Image (cartoon, rainbow, N blue to C red):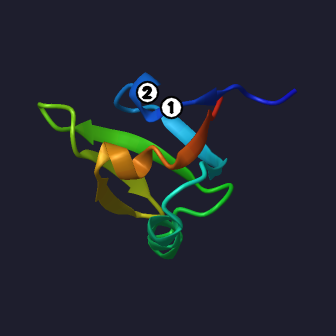
Amino acid sequence: MTNKLVTLSELAVGERVKIAGFHKGQAAYRNKLLSMGLTLGCEFTLTRIAPLGDPIEIAIRNFSLVLRKSEANLLKLERVTA
């Protein structure tokens, strides 16, 4: 059984997700995401959301990364169940 894909806006702070793929569009920025460690199957935790909702901070591979929501929305995400 596969998990339902979720969007970034559906996540709460502290929730853990896995990258299931990438949405089409902005190939150049997709390559930047890949170079920052956001690769297929990688897990991360949403750690902070700015007061106005943008940007967001995630904890991934033992470091914190801040992304604009528009950039992070290129990711297809699955919730990680404990």
Q: How far apart are marks 1 and 2 (CA)?
A: 7 Å
In what quadrant of the picture does the C terminus appear? top right
In the image, what residue occupies the spot 53% across and 70% down? 34
Residue extending furthest toward the left:
51
Left or right position of 45 against 55: right
In the image, what residue occupies the spot 60% across and 52% down? 24
- Give the labeled residue for mark 1: 7
- Whether residues under marks 1 and 2 lie with C-beta atoms below 8 angstroms apart, the answer is yes
Q: Is residue 11 positioned above or below 21 on the image?
A: above
Left or right position of 49 against 75: left
User: Crowdedness of circle 1 by 10 Å Cα count: few (<14), some, many (20+)?
Assistant: some
- Going by the numbered disc 1, the residue's amino acid type is Thr
- Give the labeled residue for mark 2: 11
Q: Where is residue 80 in the image (x, y as percent from the top left)?
A: 63, 35
- Going by the numbered disc 2, the residue's amino acid type is Leu
In what quadrant of the picture does the N terminus appear? top right
> Where on the picture, by quarter, is residue 52?
top left
In the image, what residue occupies the spot 32% across and 41% down? 47
Residue extending furthest toward the bottom:
35
Left or right position of 26 against 1: left
User: Crowdedness of circle 2 by 10 Å Cα count: few (<14), some, many (20+)?
Assistant: some
Q: Where is residue 38 in the image (x, y as percent from the top left)?
A: 52, 62
Pick the front one: 72 or 28: 28
Q: Which mark is residue 28?
A: none
Tell how many labels.
2
